[in-house]
Image (cartoon, coloured by chain):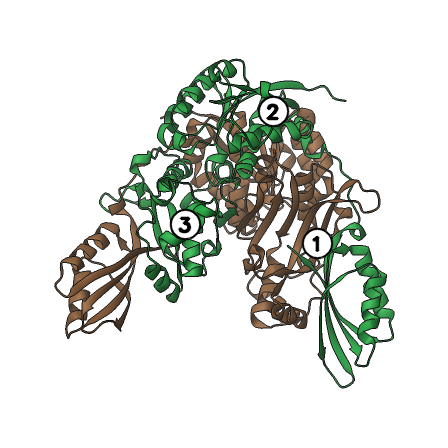
Chain colours: A brown, B green
Amino acid sequence: MIAYRSLRVALLGGGSVGSQVARLLIEHGPELAQRVGAELELVGIAVRDVDAKRDVELPRELYTTDAETLILGADVVVELIGGLEPARTLVLQALRSGADVVTANKALLATHGPELFEAAEQVGAQLSYEAAVAGAIPIIRPLRESLAGDRVKRILGIVNGTTNFILDRMDTSGADLDDALAVATELGYAEADPTADIGGYDAAQKAAILASLAFHTTVPIESVHREGITSVTAAQIESARKAGYVVKLLAICERLTDPDTGEEGVSARVYPALVDRRHPLAAVHGANNAVFVEAEAAGSLMFYGAGAGGVETASAVLGDLVAVARRHVVGGPGLAESTHASLPVLEIGKVITRYAVTIEVTDEPGVLATVARIFADHEVSVEQLEQSVSAAGTATLVIGTHHARESALAETVTALEASPVVSQIASVLRVEGA
Amino acid sequence: MIAYRSLRVALLGGGSVGSQVARLLIEHGPELAQRVGAELELVGIAVRDVDAKRDVELPRELYTTDAETLILGADVVVELIGGLEPARTLVLQALRSGADVVTANKALLATHGPELFEAAEQVGAQLSYEAAVAGAIPIIRPLRESLAGDRVKRILGIVNGTTNFILDRMDTSGADLDDALAVATELGYAEADPTADIGGYDAAQKAAILASLAFHTTVPIESVHREGITSVTAAQIESARKAGYVVKLLAICERLTDPDTGEEGVSARVYPALVDRRHPLAAVHGANNAVFVEAEAAGSLMFYGAGAGGVETASAVLGDLVAVARRHVVGGPGLAESTHASLPVLEIGKVITRYAVTIEVTDEPGVLATVARIFADHEVSVEQLEQSVSAAGTATLVIGTHHARESALAETVTALEASPVVSQIASVLRVEGA
């Protein structure tokens, strides 16, 4: 048993993301401690109402309404209140007290980013915000670090799940905006007041954050050109489809030359745009998010995943929390953490997968039963079987199995090979990704 | 003019990646210095033959055959020699001298990873290897950091560009393996001896690295089950297509339960497998790479981009180099670097984009000329024009423009609105992503 030092984590906000962060912190505590090299101790959750009903049940004594006291003495403060105030004041207070801050608050960063970063820098504290853009999709860290030696030329982002759901729905069903919005609301993809999403405000905040980061330049939210999807019609989407395009609400960050002065500048803008159906962004359906990055040396990259649900966003928050906490631990971000788990590596025979087997059999009564018996004898369940007559006297069987143990599947194939009714094993392939 | 301290960077290997790293280090020197807060001084490039002909021309005095001397006194050593020896010995030497190491060497990591990580940890040095898997696609850092608070369940990776090119070619053209390989060789996607790629050895090394990282467990290369694509036939691909599948060479890393003991274990394996055509991995064409990650909280994520070309890999190496160098700079990874560039944010009117405009016009002679004149007057070049008759006496024009300044496009639309031949502007949308 290793005794770890402990890092005090204060959580501000107990909503859907906050509850998930708290749950994962507690449930995965020992695993996280190993990865960090220090225990992450949840010292409290600041909320408006201690007795409010919540999705995740946690000990009542964790809750407090006194955020300011909670911050005092915390090593890391996780801000998940959202909105500008009191989030701004509390984050500044936390940073000035020397705590590191992890936040998912896009409005705060887009509006007060420079002030917060300056406060962090003055005391050498860290301010991390992977969860602020595109939920669990790692995009902040790749831009800040992986592409730090490259030059980003352009970012095209589908960064708002609600509007992507609506536009995708319009595209696939022919619905108009109001109907698609109604479906989105019913399914919980749109809020009661959908203005922030369909008006493009949410996407504009994310564009400001991405552009600031990609171009190492302060891009204030006021300088982001913003058009929402409210004027997009079913007719537009229909003619886009006919022309080989799909309509997507894009957050665009671009490095460009000022046509008047010839000097280098940047642009951040949000509007519904036509995207060629062969472009990877066109394949981003439903409420998913994706960020397409074009860089000078790296070429085109795309980051794709679920939009910002509570648990997905919590994953990004925890990633930041672990990274921030690692820097607290003496010796910096240890590398040996990579192998602390030491799980056994299982041989291929223990893997659970599916097979697609094509065999040639003699075309006579009872063959199907014989083949089916061979699968059953090895406890491999057949999902699908297709028979077609090939040469005279022979038939081709294509058999798709359910998930089964690899060794059982392999033995089944061996038994098929030995069977007198099988004249040839034409193909054996595993089926993956489902 | 800010005076930066200087970090000494030693480059081992002057091949296609090494040359690009050296070029970018020199060309982007001032920009990188700002991002790091220290100058990255290229002190030398260790090669076998100082006088060999190279893609990128650099001062001859940078080259040396004496790698061991070059390492001495370096703050960061970038290993791009490839293969096991002398790479292993030199990397160990560098780490033991206290230098940080950046490497793109997948064979080295898959084979001697634990030894190298231990050496690094003993002296508190960093060992970074983003470029070792999937070229410029950030996958190591997301796994190490972004998903550090989550639990990875499965990784499905298309991590070898050569085999993906070959399988994609077989799928789209019906070619057999030999013909597709010949095309890959001709286009430079396959090496003269393609064994490492088509035999699955390259993918297996990457699977070992990804599995070790994702599951915090040492996964030796010998424990990776490996099947190449050599037995994949045109007939298999044809019947896969008919059944709605595509054949991809997958590197699979999976957390699973040992069916015999009921205990948790991991599996790393490489084989050609059937993937549903609706799966995001099925849309990865040509020599591109993609890594599909399923995590407990984050859900499904995909990272997509170009395979490992010289300049793409150099981007990943430089990203690591900047990250490693930042930790050398007092005060840790400064956050203010995010805004050092301070480029002007340009208003929307200065953006260069394309428009798709749908208008209704009176259906009479000369209307097309009038409309075309309005575009020309605003210096907007028309790429495509489609006319269809709508109601009696009116026609619908769909006009696609070439790239033009947004303000010119907007003024064109205003002029169209004012024109007597235009009865209605039905739709104006920008076209992006091309």
Report whether A400 appears left or right of B211: left
Name the amino acid type tagged 2.
Gly
Q: Which residue is mark 1?
A: A270
Residue B416 screen position, x and y as percent: 83, 68
Q: Residue at x 53, y 50 (%)?
A: A304
Report whether A225 appears left or right of B330: right
**Front-most of residues A157 and B53:** B53
**Front-most of residues A140 and B60:** B60
Report whether B348 appears left or right of A88: right
Q: Which residue is mark 2?
A: B332
For the residues labelled 3 and 1, the Cα–Cα distance comes to: 45 Å
**Front-most of residues B54 and B137:** B54
State the quadrant of the C terminus of chain B: bottom right
Q: Is residue B23 visible?
A: yes
Residue A430 screen position, x and y as percent: 31, 55
Give the number of the mark in front: 2 or 1: 1
> Helix or strand or loop: what does disc 2 sit on?
loop
Q: Is residue A133 visible?
A: no
> Helix or strand or loop: what does disc 1 sit on?
strand
Query: Compared with residue A286, is residue A152 higher up or lower down, i.e. above or below?
Result: above
Do the CB atoms of the residues marked 2 and 3 lie less than 8 Å apart?
no
Chain under disc 2: B
Name the amino acid type tagged 1.
Val
Q: Residue at x 40, y 29 (%)?
A: B83
Q: Are marks 2 and 3 on the same chain?
A: yes
Give the number of the mark in front: 3 or 1: 3
